[in-house]
Image (tube, helix red, strand yellow):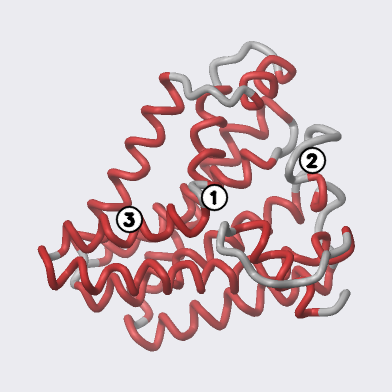
Amino acid sequence: MTNPLAAFLAAWMFLTRIPVGTKALSDADFEAAPAFYPLVGMLLGMIGALAFLPGWMIGGGFIAAIFACAATLLATGAFHEDGLADLFDGLGASTPERMMEIMRDSRLGTFGAAALFVALGLKVAALAAMPPVLALAALPVAHGLSRLSAVVVIATSTYARPEGIAKPVAAGVARSALIVAALSGVAALAAFGIFTGMGGTVCALAGLCMGHLATRLLFERKLGGYTGDCLGAVQQLSEIGFYLGLLAWL
């Protein structure tokens, strides 16, 4: 792996809109960045958790959940949500080429808007339905593991087009980067397990895996691989799956 700090900064720059003062990063840094996607995700979840607290004090669980989602939207520039909307806009296309053409279009279509509305609604509703302490614990873990879910797609699928924002990871993920990402996810899950117990952890992980697999079924059968938008969609539906699995346990 390249310089770990440079790879972390590349991951931060790729996944967030929060500026960091740093020198120019190389293509090798961005290719190694997936190693730190889960860690960046956990930090984003912590931002959401910090926003959850004042929301809870102001108006209870529903306001707290909106604050948490709004904070992560601002931190990422709705980067992943945009991918989710673009994927669903493209699903009605008759050919892979037409699907990718629609996904590149910056305009938001009806299917994309509906998917975005449902996804945000599910996140807010799920977080609001949890005990506040559990929601605070779930946010960093869900954000971290859902970024690991996207890394798994990069490692096990094929990049579907030669250009686009995901080009730095088009060649896949190096074994060392995948190991670092996986260890980060395991550590987060283990810490969550200590807090919630085995039942909640298993159900949350099962929900995340279902979100991961369901999303891959949507795009791989048509594209034969993934694009940057597909990675955003995988992250979103994996995160939602984590919350819903946890709620099913409750």
Amino acid bearing label 1: His
Q: What residue type is labelled 3?
A: Leu
Crowdedness of circle 2 by 10 Å Cα count: few (<14), some, many (20+)? many
Disc number placed over residue 84 in the picture, else none = none
Quarter of the figure with residue 37: bottom right
From this view, report whether residue 207 is shown above or below residue 216: below
Q: Sequence order check: which comes first, mark 1 or mark 3?
A: 1
- The residue labelled by disc 3 is 244
Quadrant where the N terminus is found in the figure: bottom right
Mark 2 / mark 3, whichever is N-terminal: 2
Find residue 225 and report its horizontal and vertical position in percent: 74, 37
The tag on residue 212 is 1
Q: In this view, does 41 lie above or below 226?
A: below
Q: Residue at x 83, y 65 (%)?
A: 25
| Label 1 – label 3 distance at C-alpha | 13 Å
At x 58% / y 60%, what residue is drawn?
147
Of marks 2 and 1, the one in the foreground: 2
Q: In this view, does 172 lie to the left or right of 138?
A: right
* Measured Cα–Cα span from mark 2 to mark 1: 17 Å
Tag 3's secondary structure?
helix
Residue 91, quarter of the rendered image: top right
User: On the picture, is 107 further left or further right than 247?
Assistant: right
In the rendered structure, which amino acid carries the disc numbered 2?
A: Tyr
Mark with earlier residue (2, 1)? 2
**Could you tell me if residue 207 is visible in this image?**
no
Proximity of marks 1 and 3: CB atoms separated by less than 8 Å: no
Residue behind mark 2: 159
Q: Which residue is drawn at 48% across and 24% down?
A: 108
